[in-house]
Image (cartoon, rainbow, N blue to C red):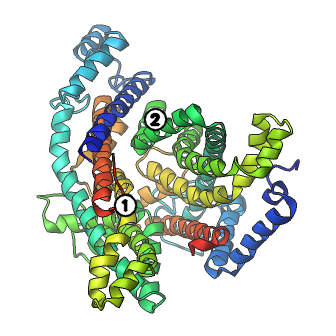
């Protein structure tokens, strides 16, 4: 498995190269640059600015310089936040985004699996229908609808929680964004768990476990859950990507100073280096996490062997 | 066989017809799915004809009715927004744009995905390997971010959005179609076609693709809400359609900004979007169950 992991890790490199190349050239062929938004500058000053950011060099030279920079973790200066490099901005935003995303993921997993298992054990009961109806709601409602509604109800009507903001990243500030982020995934994971649990509970090895007199809770937690979790584990890859993408909107709505917010601001301001830096950073993150998920799959399922 | 849109005509006469009729019968017994079809049909009908017959134009400003709540006497069913436009008509316009984007992008993804998948699966060998490798690589890309870059770079252009969203969604379609093609291409009727000298492009178009329509139908019902979601997501971020045109995402975004003073601006568009997504999800589940009974 070690060599498999290594090979997958090496496989990430060409994909990243494609991402960097496509993003780089797409942005450079764009009509309009980051500096022609305000009034027109005298030509000398414009030339100076372009020289400072290497925009006067041939495209290929710029590309190689950028690629070299990325290798050393240097994504260049931000065009808009002029005193900061992109790496600094990402470094500042990532702990916040990580805190939000990881909490949302953890809650989604714990609640989703619990709800799904309970629903499966009481299949076709009122409880089962209740859980599945709520899950359907969670799946059908996008997070950018849930988020403002949560803020409206809990922030304004009930005045229980801050509507938005991130004073110190305390509990109160986190509740609404994390809830909005986690809800669709709680729903999805609950549905997945329920489906596979129902199937697993009918299988032979569960009958064997019951036949040898194991108490039901041991049958479920020790035997059934492990097999039933497999689809959930393979969903973790897309879920991570989804939570990362979703964080863009959630951070915007709740004014959380994470990477997602920088990304949107950068996109709206044509802050190209910042946008590219975030894309490359998140692409790497998603690919590495996908690799981790695949390896985790092998640990859980003895039938999967990577060579 | 000249009518390319009707699935039953394409399948072998007796067995194929019964498969689709079977599916339709099963679907009509699924109460949630039938209800969803009815509600969705209503929403779509309203979205299509509503803006024409509504008493107000979607871009007309009523300066004496700025940001008022639902008021039946003045004819503002959903109230007005912060510049005094009728929210009811705007919501219908938004739904119209969402449906339009969904249909267009889904068609793009269908066209690319089916052709790509069918060719990869049918030709097989090294070509298949190369083509699917490419799909794998594309899968690893964080596509949402690319669509965002695309919208930023080339401006907020609705045609570009169709293409971009279609280009994102075709990957899964190509995979599904390829898998189906692999099982189809060894069947007797394909062998018969090969033996009677039909050219490969014709076999793909006339024999492979018509038999793919089952799984494709299931995937379409999943893709449409997906596209609506992504379009709203982009519009919400301010990267979708532009004023005075609107979409549900734009309306929800505007509503979220004003929710303290004008909550109806958030609640109505959000409800319409949620209703549409709900219906598509129920229909999708229903179609899947109907076409693939073992999955129940």
Quadrant of the rendered image containing residue B149: top left
Decide: is A79 above or below B140: above
Decide: is B227 above or below A162: above
Side (left or right) of A136 relative to A161: right
Mark 1 lies on residue: A303
* Residue at x 24% of width, y 75% of height: A159
Residue A60, how many percent across, how many down? 35, 13
Q: Chain for mark 2?
A: B
* Residue at x 77% of width, y 41% of height: B203
Decide: is B261 above or below B200: below
Q: Secondary structure at mark 2?
A: helix
Mark 2 and mark 1: Cα distance apart in space:
42 Å
Q: Please rate how many residues cluster around mark 1, counting C-alpha atoms within 10 Å: few if below 14, some from 14 to 19, many from 20.
A: few
Residue B288, how many percent across, how many down? 61, 67
Camera-side residue: B155 or B10? B10
Residue B134, how many percent across, how many down? 49, 35
Residue B73, how many percent across, how many down? 60, 75
Quadrant of the rendered image containing residue A208: bottom left
Dot label at residue B150: 2
Whether residue B257 can be seen here: no
Q: Secondary structure at mark 1?
A: loop
* Residue at x 80% of width, y 34% of height: B199
Side (left or right) of A84 relative to A184: left
Which image quarter is the C terminus of chain A in? Answer: top left
Q: Please rate how many residues cluster around mark 2, counting C-alpha atoms within 10 Å: few if below 14, some from 14 to 19, many from 20.
A: many
Q: How many marks?
A: 2
Do callouts 2 and 1 point to residues on the same chain?
no
Camera-side residue: A8 or B22? A8
Q: Chain for mark 1?
A: A
Q: Decide: marks 2, 1 in contact (CB < 8 A)?
A: no
Whether residue B50 can be seen here: yes
Side (left or right) of A86 relative to B269: left
């Amino acid at each position: 498995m070690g060599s498999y992991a290594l090979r997958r890790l090496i496989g990430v490199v060409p994909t990243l190269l494609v991402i960097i190349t496509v993003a780089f050239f797409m942005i450079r062929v764009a009509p309009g640059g980051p500096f022609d938004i305000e009034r027109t500058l005298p030509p000398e000053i414009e030339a100076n600015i372009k020289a400072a950011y290497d925009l006067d060099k041939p495209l290929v030279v710029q590309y190689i310089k950028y690629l070299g920079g990325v290798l050393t973790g240097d994504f260049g200066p931000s065009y808009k936040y002029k005193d900061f490099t992109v790496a600094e901005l990402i470094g500042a935003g990532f702990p916040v985004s990580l805190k939000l995303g990881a909490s949302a993921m953890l809650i989604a997993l714990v609640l989703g699996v619990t709800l799904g298992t309970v629903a499966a054990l009481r299949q076709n009961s009122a409880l089962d229908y209740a859980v599945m109806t709520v899950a359907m709601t969670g799946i059908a409602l996008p997070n950018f609808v849930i988020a403002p509604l949560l803020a409206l109800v809990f922030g304004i009507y009930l005045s229980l929680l801050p509507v938005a903001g991130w004073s110190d990243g305390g509990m109160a500030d986190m509740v609404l964004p994390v809830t909005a982020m986690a809800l669709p995934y709680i729903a999805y994971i609950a549905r997945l768990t329920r489906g596979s649990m129902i199937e697993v509970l009918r299988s032979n090895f569960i009958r064997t476990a019951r036949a040898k007199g194991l108490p039901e809770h041991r049958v479920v937690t020790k035997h059934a859950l492990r097999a039933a979790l497999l689809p959930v584990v393979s969903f973790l890859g897309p879920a991570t990507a989804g939570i990362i993408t979703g964080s863009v909107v959630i951070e915007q709505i709740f004014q959380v100073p994470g990477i997602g917010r920088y990304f949107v601001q950068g996109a709206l301001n044509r802050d190209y280096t910042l946008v590219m830096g975030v894309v490359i950073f998140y692409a790497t993150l998603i690919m590495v996490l996908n690799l981790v998920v695949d390896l985790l799959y092998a640990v859980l399922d003895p039938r999967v062997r990577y060579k | 066989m000249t009518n390319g849109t009707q699935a039953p005509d394409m399948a072998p006469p007796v067995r194929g017809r019964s498969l689709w009729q079977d599916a339709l019968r099963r679907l009509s017994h699924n109460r949630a799915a039938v209800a969803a079809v009815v509600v969705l049909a209503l929403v779509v009908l309203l979205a299509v004809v509503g803006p024409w017959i509504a008493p107000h134009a979607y871009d007309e400003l009523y300066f004496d009715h700025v940001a008022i709540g639902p008021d039946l006497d003045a004819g503002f069913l959903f109230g007005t927004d912060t510049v005094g436009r009728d929210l009811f008509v705007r919501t219908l316009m938004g739904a119209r744009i969402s449906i339009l984007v969904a249909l267009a992008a889904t068609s793009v993804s269908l066209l690319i995905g089916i052709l790509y998948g069918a060719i990869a699966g049918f030709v097989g060998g090294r070509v298949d390997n190369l083509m699917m490798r490419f799909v794998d690589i594309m899968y690893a890309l964080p596509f949402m971010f690319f669509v965002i870059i695309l919208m930023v770079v080339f401006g907020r252009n609705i045609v570009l959005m169709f293409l971009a969203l279609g280009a994102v969604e075709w990957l899964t379609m190509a995979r599904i179609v390829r898998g189906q093609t692999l099982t189809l291409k060894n069947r007797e009727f394909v062998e018969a076609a090969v033996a009677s000298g039909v050219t490969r492009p014709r076999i793909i178009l006339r024999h492979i693709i018509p038999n793919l329509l089952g799984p494709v139908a299931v995937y379409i019902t999943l893709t449409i809400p997906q596209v609506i979601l992504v379009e709203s997501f982009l519009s919400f971020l301010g990267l979708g359609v532009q004023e005075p045109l609107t979409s549900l995402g734009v309306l929800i975004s505007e509503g979220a900004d004003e929710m303290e003073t004008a909550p109806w601006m958030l609640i109505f568009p959000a409800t319409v979007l949620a209703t549409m997504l709900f219906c598509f999800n129920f229909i999708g589940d229903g179609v899947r169950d109907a076409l693939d009974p073992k999955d129940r």
